[in-house]
Amino acid sequence: MSPFSWRPRIVPLATLCIFLFTVALLVGCRSQVALSPASISRDPYASGDEQCGLQGELLPSPLRVIVEAPRRRGLLGGKGSARPVVGARVTFAIAEPAAGAAFAANGLARLEVPTDVAGSASATVRLGSRPGNVCITASVDTPSGAKSVRFRVLCGVELIGHDLEEPTGGTIDSFGVRLQDGPGTPAAGIEACFRVADASSDSSVGDELVWTDERGLATTSWTLGKSVRPYFASVTLRDTRPAVPQERRFTAGPITFHAMAMSKTKMLVKLFGGLAIFLVGMKGMSAGLRRMADRRLKAILQAMTRNRFLATGVGAGLTAMVQSSSAVTVMTVGFVNAGLMTLTQAIGVVYGASIGTTITAQIVAFQLDWVAYPAVAVGLAMTALGRRPWLKALGEAIMGFGLLFLGMTIMSDTLKPLRHSPEFQALFQLFDCSPVDGRIPAMSTLMCIVIGTVATCIVQSSSATVGLVIALSGQGLVSFYTAVPLVVGDNIGTTITAILASLGANRNAKRAALAHALYKIFGAAWMYLLLFVPLWHGQPVFLGFVDHITPGEVFAAAPENLTRHVANAHTAFNVLNCMLFLPFVDFMARLCRKVIPVTDADRETVLEYLEPHLLDSPSLALQQAVREVGYMLRRAQKSINEGCEFFYGGPSDLAQKIKAREDLIDRLQAEITSYLVELSRKELAPMEATLIPALIHAVNDAERIGDHSENLVELTHLKHDNQHTITDTAEEDIRRLQDLLNQQFDVILRTLGHAESNEVDHVLVKEEEITELVKAATEAHVRRLEAQTCEVQAGVVFLDFIAHLERVGDHLVNIAERAGRIMQVTGS
C-alpha cells in the first residue's frame, strides 16, 4: 500500500467536516439587507475637521462622515455593533455661501453624496476669498428626523510646522501660521497668542505674543518635555487692524498644533521591559499550573491513547490549563521520544494545543488591567506563606497571571504615544494590509505573516507576540486587516520551540515536531487564500465571519472592539484549522514518516525512556527513570546469558557484543544517575523523593552485573587459551545456576513493570537455591578433583565462573529489595 493511500473511513468524516465548515462560512453570503440610517458622525480617524488653507486652494483632505444603522447585539453579547449604511444620501452644506467657498465636485455650496460600503461619505472643499472660519454641516435623514454634524475649516491660514517630531527635551525652532487677507496678499499686524495646551506639562513656547510681519508670518519656538508623549499647543488670532473692514478681519478661533517628543531608546527599553514582565508572568503562571496538574498527567496520558478526538480535547484542555502551547508541544515531543505516545496521538494533541493556547489572547483582550497588582500581591502572599505544595503552586500561577497583565499594560502604555508619531505611522504604513481599490494587498499580507513568524521565533512565545499585536491594534496602530496576518504568522513561529526540542530526540519526536510545523504552515496557506475571497458582504470571508460573531463593527471607519476581534480571529483560525485537518491525522503521520523515514539508526541516543523535557513533570519523569532501570537490567541480563553461552562454546563474536554492551551499560549508569540527580532537585512528593537513592543503588547494582559479564568473558578466554575442558556435570551446574538467575531477572523486571509486588519474595527464595547450588557444585567439584576426573586449572576457572554468577545473584537481591518499594510508589 502506498504511504499516501487513504483509509476508506476517513473520506466520509472529512467530507462531513468540510461541508459543515463551508456552510458555516457561507452563512455570510446572503444578500445585503437594506438598513435605515440611525446616526451620523465625523470619521474619528480622518474627519478633515479643523483644516487650514489659503484662499482659492483645495483643502488637502476631504470632510468625511460615517452613517450607521441602529446598534444590534452580537452573537456573543456585549455592547453590540452598529453596521454601516450603504447608499444613504448625505447632504453637505456650506453655512455662508457668500464667503466664496464651494465644493470641488460641483462648484456649489451644497452637495449630496451617497455612502459607500463602509457607510462613509466625503466632500472636498475649495476655499473662497474671505479669510477666517468656514462652517459646513453634513446631514442625513433618519426615521426619527434629520441628524447632522458640523465641521470648521479656516481660510487664509497656512500652518508653519506640520507632523512635528523632536527628541524628548528638544526644541522646535519655528512653528506658527502664515496669514493672507486675499490671494497673494499677506496679512500683517495680526496678533497671534501662543500657549501650551496643558499648563501643567513641562513643555513651553518661546514668545507667547507675536504679530504677523509683512509676509503674514507669526512664528515662535517650542521646547518639548522630557516624557515620550504627544504635546499640544495652540495659537489664537486677534485682528484689531483699524484699516481693515470688520467683515474682512480674521475671526479664527484657536488653532491646535501637536508635536511628538520621541526617545526611541526609552521606548525600546520600556517596551522590552514590559515584554519581559509579560514572559516572566506567562512562565510563572504556566509553571504553577503545570505543577498543580503534574499528578494528573498519568491519567491524562491514558486518555490521550484512546483516539484522535480525545487526544485533541486533551491537548486543548491541557494547554488551557498550563497556559502555554510551547510547553505542551515540547512535553508531547518528550512523550513521543520516551515512547509514551505514538506519532498519531501526538499530532492530535498538537492540534488541540493550538486551540488551548488562544485562551491567553482571550484573557488579554478582555483588558483586565485592574487585576494586575492585586493578583501579584495575593500570589506572592500565597507563595511565601502557603505550606502545602499545591497552594504554593496556585500562588505562583496567580502571581504570574498578575505579572502577565502588568507587562501587557506597560506594553500598551508604551505603544500608545506612537499614534502621534509621523515616523512610526509611516513605518506601519509599509505593511498595512487595508484594502486598496477594494482588494487586500497580497505582498503586504505576506510580509505581515513573515514578520509575525520571525518575531515569534525570536521570542519563542506566540502568546507574547499575539499580545503585542492586540496592544498595537488597541492603540489604533494596526488595522484588523493587518492584525490577522500578523497573528497567522505568530502561529507559524510558535513551532520553533518544538523543533528545537526535537533536535536531540529520536526520529519519531522529530516527526511530531514536523507535523506541528506542517499543520501551522498548511493552515496559514489556506487562511492567506481566504483573505482574498470577498464573500461576506464584500469583506474577506474569514474576517467577515469573525466580525459576525464578535460585538462591535470592525469594518467601520471607526473600528469598534478591535482587540476582541483580533483575539477571536486567533481562536477561530485555530478552531477551523483543527476541524479541517483532524480527519487527516493519519495522512499527516504518513507524510511525516515519508519526509523523515525509518532507518537502522532510528534510536539516536543511549537512553531508551528518559526524556529531559519530562523533568518539568517529576512524577512522569520518575516513572520513566524506573523504566530506564528496567531497560538497563535487561541489557545486563542479556550480557550474562551471552557470557554463559560463550563459555559453553558459542560464537567468538559474542565477546565483542558483550564488550560493546558493557560500554552501553556504563554510559547508561552515568546518564541515569545524572538524570536522577537532576530530578532530585525538582519538587517531588516525600514518598517519591525517597525513591531517588533506591534507584541510584539499583543502577549501580545493574552496572556491577554488567562488569561480571566481562569477567565471564575473561574466564572463557582463559579456558580457551589453555585448552581446558569442563566436565558435563560442571556445565550442567552452570546451566542450572543460569536458569535460577534468569528467574530472578524476570521477577524483578515484572515488578519494575508494575506486576504483583509479592513476587519479589521469589527472588530471595531463588537466592537460597543459588547458594545451595553453588555449595553443592563446589563439593561435587572437590570430589572430581579427588577422583582426578577434571583438571586442576579447569576447576579453578569453573569455581571462579560460578562465584561470579553467585555475585550476580547477590546484586539481584539488592535490586529486588528496592523493587517492591519502587512499585508501591510509582505503580499507584
Image (tube, rainbow, N blue to C red):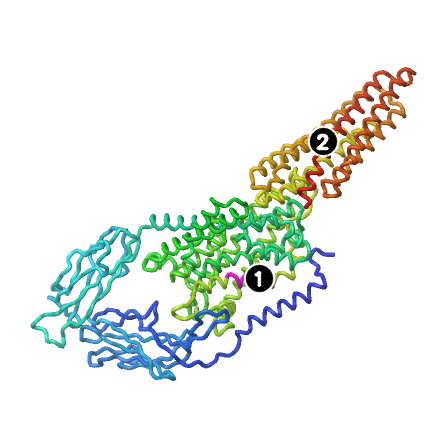
**What residue is shown at x 41% (from left), y 68% (from top)?**
560
Q: Amino acid at mark 2?
A: Asn
In the rendered image, the vertical position of residue 816 relative to residue 375, given as above or below? above
Residue 324 visible (yes or no): yes
The image quarter containing residue 604 is top right
Query: Which portion, as a residue range, is magenta?
Result: 570-579
Secondary structure found at label 1: helix
- Image coordinates of residue 439 in percent, x first then y, are 45, 68
Secondary structure found at label 2: helix
- Identify the main secondary structure in magenta: helix
- Image coordinates of residue 163 in percent, x first then y, are 28, 60
Image quarter of the N terminus: bottom right
> In the image shown, does 617 or 755 lie closer to the viewer?
755
> Is 264 situated left or right of 295 in this image?
left
Q: What residue is shown with label 2?
A: 814
Q: Which of the two labelled residues, at mark 1 and mark 2, occupies the earlier sequence position? A: 1
In the rendered image, the vertical position of residue 283 relative to residue 645, given as above or below? below
Q: What residue is shown with label 1?
A: 577
Residue 446 visible (yes or no): no
Give the label on residue 436, or none.
Answer: none
The image quarter containing residue 740 is top right
- Image coordinates of residue 681 in percent, x first then y, are 56, 38
